Image (tube, helix red, strand yellow):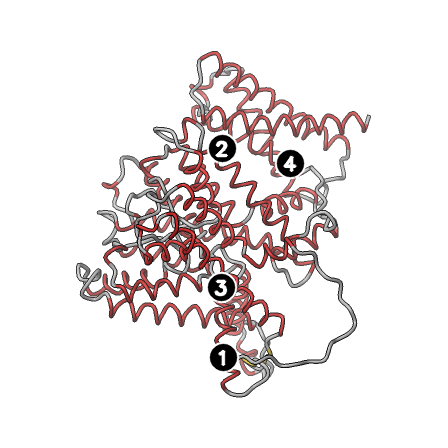
Amino acid sequence: MKLNLKLFYAVAFLISLFGVLVFLADFGFVQTERSQYLLNGFYFIVLIVGIVATVLRYLENKNQYKNKQKVLVFDIVTVVLSFVIILIHFLEVDSEKNASLFYNDLWIKFAIILTFIREFAELRFNFKRTVLNPAQLFILSFLFIIFLGTLLLMLPKATYNGISFINALFTSTSAVCVTGLIVEDTGTYFTLFGQSIILVLIQLGGLGILTFTSYFSYFFKGGSTYENQLALSDMNSSQKLGEVFSTLKYVLLITFYIETFSAISIYLSLNDSLFKSHGEQIYFSVFHSISAFCNAGFSTLTNSLFETGFKYNYYLQLVIIITFVLGGLGFPIVVNILNYLKYKISLLINFSKLKQTYKPWVLNLNSRITLITTLTLSLVGFIVFYILEYNNTLAEHSGFGKIVTALFGATTPRTAGFNTVEMTTLAFPTLMMILLLMWVGASPSSTGGGIKTSTFAIATLNILSLAKGKSRIEVYRREIADISVRRAFAIISLSLIVIGMGIMLISVFDNEKGLMNIAFECFSAYSTVGLSLGITGSLSMVSKFILIGIMIVGRVGMLSIVIAIFNKVKHKNYRYPTEEITIN
């Protein structure tokens, strides 16, 4: 009996998987009346099998989900929704009269997605470190999403006039790597279906598909293997093995809350007359909220936020700034800041604690270094941008407008990719400053790219330490670990090698584009920024492939690729005599 049930559950998963593929084909291809009838019949089978599989799990083991109220709620909602949809859409029980709310075909697709999530979560995945190490698994997950996204973008109904493989691959890579470089205009070239695919790719790429799959699996099962936890702890930088899934939970919750709040704020900042309907305005808000938090830089506007009707909307720009800065800080930093604020609030509520001599180390060293570096780079960038562009790109703005636009121009190179000024009109010194800001990028464990603020901070602290004649890097009564210093300089060296090779190769195949334009493109691609001086779409096929490679390397990290290629050497309990090498 149990063997038969296992076989049925396996069939249920395969049917739910085909259900997702079929509804993607339903969206992507033009359907005849007969083909649509057959597809609807298959949807009916998927929902029926999903209901039966869920009910059987509870009948098979009544105590399996006894202490999992959230799973029970999810299953009840899925079963009830599926049952209602079957009644309305397939059995036609007074659908338009009594339940017009659920008569939209999108409800069928939504129910199929819920069914697939439920069946997928029941699968047992074991990450074997002997087969794939975490770095290899991380890289393969990105390559898989990129390839899948390419196929989806090539569906007939994803674009208005079709798209070539190289342009679909470039767009998919740019979305998954949350870069924002485009070869085709997102708003006018892609249909609503195509734009939705790009949006999903941005969300998956910003957080990582393994984050979603691992947490959903844990959510339904309530546990995971030791091997899985080790692999995930390496990928999400958890300090303790027991914190792996709580970290994933925080990542998803923080993402959901910030993106929701940002979408609402964007919606309230918009002028209704710029949109044909409220639905279009809502979609615009959601798209730019997700794109901003994931530091993707994709926009449905042809000229990004420099578009007429948006470039003087300073409230909108401030919302976008806050959103991509929070996304670029990194999830561990945001969680640590929230804990710090919670601690400060508790002190204000409980006055007796204010007099205590012991002060806990709530805001950790990583957060302090990241916040100081981020604020310093943003402040210096703002001042330089404001001074250099005061009589140039800022000339058309008012006093407050100049401040917001300069702040936007100083923070967006930190891998956000939106622009509120015409990039080609910026002064040469401003472009050089933007190159530096793009190279540094966002913070570790964030949705952004670049060498990261902590790497830049460690390199700067090392210089100061050497200048003072110290043999160690000390800051805030802490000593920076040697492994952190070695990683920082490895990342810096590898980044310069990749960017330099990219500039050299593109200069060979597109030498007429100019060195500055090519260098800007390569820095933007590696740091997953998305800012461009306008040459992306006109690059040759070979140069596009080179940029695709740079974007992938920049997103997953060259150091991760090196780790994925080389096998780890076992630690040996000996040390050779130390000898200094002549440096200068």
Residue at the extreme bottom of the image, as rendered: 469
Identify which amino acid the numbered label 2 is placed on: Leu
Label of residue 463 in the image: 1
Q: Earlier in the sequence, mark 3 or mark 2?
A: 2
Instruction: Find residue 411 and report its image quarter.
Output: bottom left
CB-based contact (under 8 Å), mark 2 and mark 4: no
Q: Distance between the residues labelled 1 and 4?
A: 50 Å
Q: Quadrant of the N terminus?
A: top right
Q: Residue furthest top?
A: 34
Q: CB under 8 Å between callouts 1 and 4?
A: no
Q: How crowded is mark 1: few (under 14 residues within 10 Å), some or many (20 or more)?
A: few
Give the label on residue 151, or none.
Answer: 2
- Label 4 belongs to which residue? 120
Q: What residue appears at the point 74 percent right and 50 percent down from the top-left corner?
A: 130
Determine which residue is flagged by label 3: 452
Up-down: is 41 above or below 76?
Answer: above
For label 4, count other residues whose C-alpha is less than 10 Å away and answer few (under 14), some (14-19) or many (20+). some
Q: In which quarter of the image is residue 487?
A: bottom right
The residue that appears at 36% across and 34% down in the rendered structure is 190
The secondary element bearing badge 2 is classed as helix
Which mark is in front, 4 or 3? 3
Between disc 2 and disc 4, the foreground one is 2
Q: 270 or 386: nearer the eye? A: 386
Q: How far apart are marks 4 and 3 (CA)?
A: 35 Å
Q: Which badge, 1 or 3, is on the more N-terminal residue?
A: 3
Spatial CA span between label 1 and label 3: 17 Å
Residue 459 placement (x, y as % from top left): 50, 73
Label at residue 145: none
The CA span between labels 1 and 2 is 48 Å
| First in residue order: circle 1 vs circle 4 | 4
